[in-house]
Amino acid sequence: LVSATAVVSRTLQFFGRSFSKMASSSTSHTTAVIAHQVITDLTVRLFSPIHPLSTSELDPHVWHRVEKDLYLYTSCQSAWLYVALVNETKLVAGDLLVVDIKVGRKPPNSSSDHQWESRPGGIWVLREKFSGNIDDAVTGVDVLFGVDAVDPRPQWTLMELPLKLQARAEVPVARLSVRRGRVMPRPDAREALRVREDGRFKIVQISDTHMVTGVGVCNDAIDADGNPLPKTEADPLTVKFIGNILDIEKPNLVILAGDQLHHDIPDSQSALFKVVAPLIERSIPFAAVFGNHDSEGIHALTRRAQMSILQDLPFSLCESGPEQIDGIGNFYLQILAPAPSNLLLSTLYFLDSHGQIASSLHNPDYDPIKQSQINWFLSVSKAQRSAHEKGNDKSRFYLPLVFLHIPLPEFGDRRLRIRNGHRREPTESPSFNSHFYDALVEAGILAVGCGHDHVNDFCALLPPQMQGESDRIPQLGPWLCYGGCSGFGGYCEYGIERYHRRVRVFELDATAGSLKTWKRVEYAINRVDELVLVENGVVIDTPREENEGSWYVGS
């Protein structure tokens, strides 16, 4: 089997794209370098350990394998899509180019003088002679899996009918996605994030979607009254739930807070596309951090490979971050005042919280935030605050936030004052405390959003800490806020109790210097557990108000 890194490298080259990693402080996206390649043919080859089929007749300089087993590694034999690629500059008049692809048992009706040609897997290709341009030629072919697969990439069209492979019924079907014409590059500059004219900016934090290859299964859904429901398809419910929340909240930004993907899935790309499609369909900018499960499994794409996919999607603000810093996805985004002002009003920091590690101290145990990340964060946060103060007339507030997946050890501190929501399971965090929390206090971070522990959904404060001289007032904050689980493919129960899926919303008001949060919960008509976290740019401690029991339809 080819490694995940090799898989994505080969696949991205095949797509005719190369991806430039964005600097962590960048506010523009580097345009991908375009290699204008066209497809002249394609085929499917089967391989068996008993009767291996030689591919020696396929010129490796022309034929490229899409590194996805069409049987998704479930059979003793494997099947692979091979595509013949030729660079546009090497085409001569009369060369045959693929101009259309169909899938079916019978040849499609032809509206041209050319005949459809049969290929294995129920593929039909229509080829025409090169006439000087490639505008109508097929320039990319990919494979996605599942009846619920989507392709949110511009210029790509996902075929409805799956390949004819005689795979087992439980294996997610393989479907071709086709791109035609020249690749349209992303613009060099991306639009800046800005507060609305009323000074507000809304963020929806979506945690733990746990998408899989195919529809998946949900084992712990409940109805509006909390009664258990039968097993059902998971991912379609997650997509619907997310879409409903986005339509209600209409956020300025969505933050995917990790574990977008379930562990050990055979095709990361298909699952990842399902997560981001509702955001792209609604033209909502998004950023993401990785969770411990996103890159788990022998067939999972690496974090770097997934970030490359995310960076090239419409409305993506995702970044890989500096090479010298531990992890993938350490970056920040700026939120500015309404145009034409470039006054910095908020900085959102994103950090890779890594994954599970072998440990004799705790099981499970996780890698802590590394010192290189802490040093980077302290340096950047100091520069960001200075940039705000330099351009500020002292009448505008600065509201910095941090997002990561795995909670810091402080989320499990017994001194924690929970002000809304609930702790329904123990905090799973690194056993080694690298004291990133102290850096958050030093940087004046107002709130931290995380995921990971699916049925925890509280916001809480530690007792205030002294900062600087001993005669100064102890400083509150940052708020420590769980997002709760949004995905129907991940667990949403603890012990014998099941809970509803949910997401967290943050709303910044740069004019008033306030930060509010609330949750959107399955079946809930209104906001749940709304809480003011910050007033006049300062963390405040709000007494808890219990309002459970009035959340649900019919209650």
Image (cartoon, rainbow, N blue to C red):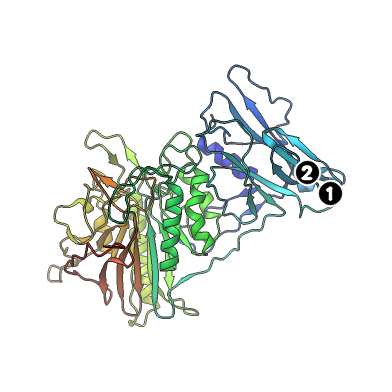
**Disc 2 to disc 1, how far (Cα)?**
9 Å
Circle 2 residues within 10 Å: few <14, some 14–19, many ≥20:
many
Question: For the point 69% across and 36% down, which residue is it?
Answer: 122
Above or below — where is 446 with respect to 61?
below
Choose the circle earlier in sequence order: 2 or 1: 1
Residue at numbered disc 1: 112
**Residue 397 placement: quadrant:** bottom left
Residue 122 visible in the current orientation: yes
Q: How many marks?
A: 2
Where's the C terminus, which quadrant?
bottom left
Residue 278, percent from left and from top: 49, 58
Q: What type is the residue that disc 2 sits on?
A: Leu
Q: What type is the residue that disc 1 sits on?
A: Ser
Residue 518, percent from left and from top: 30, 65
Asked whether disc 2 touches disc 1, contact meaning CB atoms under 8 Å apart, the reply is yes
Residue 59, percent from left and from top: 73, 31
Residue 83 visible in the current orientation: no
Q: Which mark is residue 126?
A: 2
Under circle 1, the secondary element is: loop
Q: Which mark is residue 465?
A: none
Q: Nearer the viewer, mark 2 or mark 1?
A: 1
Under circle 2, the secondary element is: strand
Above or below — where is 514 with respect to 13?
below
Circle 1 residues within 10 Å: few <14, some 14–19, many ≥20:
few
Residue 398, percent from left and from top: 34, 73
Question: For the point 47% across and 79% down, which residue is it?
Answer: 341
- Residue most toward the front? 554
